[in-house]
Image (cartoon, grey):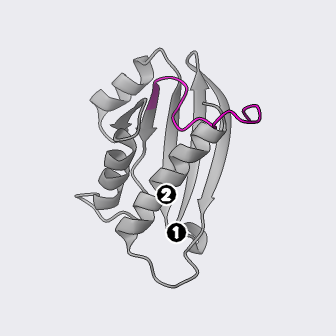
Amino acid sequence: MPPEGVPAPTTLSQQWMIGIERMRDDPGPRLPYTNRMIEDLAAMPKAQVVFLGVPQNDIQFNVWQGPKLRLDPWLHGEGNCMNVSYTLFQSGQRQALFGLVIAPLPAGVEPDSACVDRAASAFYQALVVQGL
């Protein structure tokens, strides 16, 4: 938390590599919601994003020397908009495993695309709040 009168940060503190696994319950082979999550997060400042479903991207993720996160999203997990598990790596070593639940909207049915957009924004903001 910043000192009183100092605005809270709105972006990550440094460049992060975010590797995204295939979103559970995303219809293949096109993976529209996994791709949408990748696009949403790639548009955020200081975030480099790769899909971890192809070998060359796995290599890119594994050789990244800076801080990185492995993201495992689940569309409509346990009745929520989305459940997200993410693993934090520093200096190539796993440091911590976190979870984030994006609750369903109380007003009713939310389009899957809107849920993904909301989840990507909430996930990024959670990282900023954690001081990453």
Q: Which amino acid does label 1 sit on?
A: Cys
- Between disc 2 and disc 1, whose residue precedes? 1
Left or right, 92 with reference to 3: left
x then y, percent, for residue 16: 47, 27
Q: Which mark is residue 14?
A: none
Left or right, 97 with reference to 116: right
- Location of the N terminus by quadrant is top right
Foreground of the two, 108 or 97:
108
Residue furthest to the right in view is: 4
Residue at x 62%, y 60% (from the top left corner)? 101
Circle 2 is placed at which residue position? Answer: 119
Circle 1 is placed at which residue position? Answer: 81
Residue at x 32%, y 31% (from the top left corner)? 57
Foreground of the two, 68 or 131:
131
Q: How crowded is mark 1: few (under 14 residues within 10 Å), some or many (20 or more)?
A: many
**Element under disc 1:** loop
The quarter of the displayed image where residue 93 is located? top right
Does 67 lie within the magenta span?
Answer: no
* In this view, 52 is above or below 22: above
x then y, percent, for residue 3: 76, 31
Q: Residues within 10 Å of mark 2 (few under 14, many from 20)?
A: many
- Location of the C terminus by quadrant is top right
Left or right, 12 with reference to 61: right
Q: What residue type is labelled 2?
A: Ala
Residue at x 43%, y 23% (from the top left corner)? 62
* In this view, 97 is above or below 40: above
Give the residues in magenta. 1-17
Does 10 lie within the magenta span?
Answer: yes
Q: How far apart are marks 2 and 1 (CA)?
A: 8 Å
Residue furthest to the front in view is: 5
